[in-house]
Amino acid sequence: MDPWKELEIARGASRQEIRRAYLRLARSTHPDCNDDPAAHQRFLRVRAAYEMLTGTSGATASPEPVATAVRVTPGEIIAAARAVFLRELQKHGMRLDSSGFAFNHLGMRIVMRIA
């Protein structure tokens, strides 16, 4: 496949000209815009040609999010969960003590004991 021919541009075209040609052809051949099955195949060839000429993967070269592994101990997980739980209790006017948690509701003191 000749990417220059596929994008209908002259050899040695600038990066901006390549992008303009890609966007023009992508709009007219994209499956969402054109129901013709041949147009879909043309769209795939146009995209491949663009990727070959620009060295990117797709029309926008946005970086993929990278997941990083973090080692944590079970104790750290429990401590983090406890901190989130306490923050949520405080947000709703509750407090936690050694026997459970308590809060005021409609002027009544409600205490929930943890068995």
Image (cartoon, grey):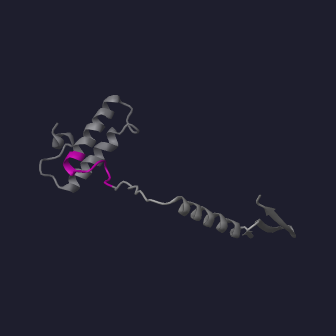
Q: Quadrant of the C terminus?
A: bottom right
Q: Residue at x 76, y 60 (%)?
A: 114
Q: What stretch is highlighted in magenta?
A: 51-61
Residue 1: name its quadrant. Answer: top left
- Is residue 72 shown left or right of residue 110? left
Q: Which residue is drawn at 32% across and 38% down?
A: 29
Report the predominant secondary structure element of the magenta stretch: loop
Image position, residue 83 (x, y; %): 61, 67
Q: Which residue lies furthest to the left in this view?
A: 11
Foreground pick, 4 / 114: 114
Q: In the rendered structure, does residue 57 fall within the stretch colored magenta?
A: yes
- Is residue 110 shown left or right of residue 36? right
Location of residue 6 with respect to 65 vertically, above or below: above
Foreground pick, 40 / 70: 70
Foreground pick, 101 / 55: 101
Image position, residue 77 (x, y; %): 55, 60
Image position, residue 23 (x, y; %): 30, 48
Image position, residue 48 (x, y; %): 25, 41
Residue 25: name its quadrant. Answer: top left
Q: How many labels does the image show?
A: 0
Location of residue 60 with respect to 111 vertically, above or below: above
Location of residue 1 with respect to 77 vertically, above or below: above
Q: Residue at x 76, y 66 (%)?
A: 99
Q: Which residue lies furthest to the top in this view?
A: 37
Q: In the rendered structure, does residue 17 fall within the stretch colored magenta?
A: no
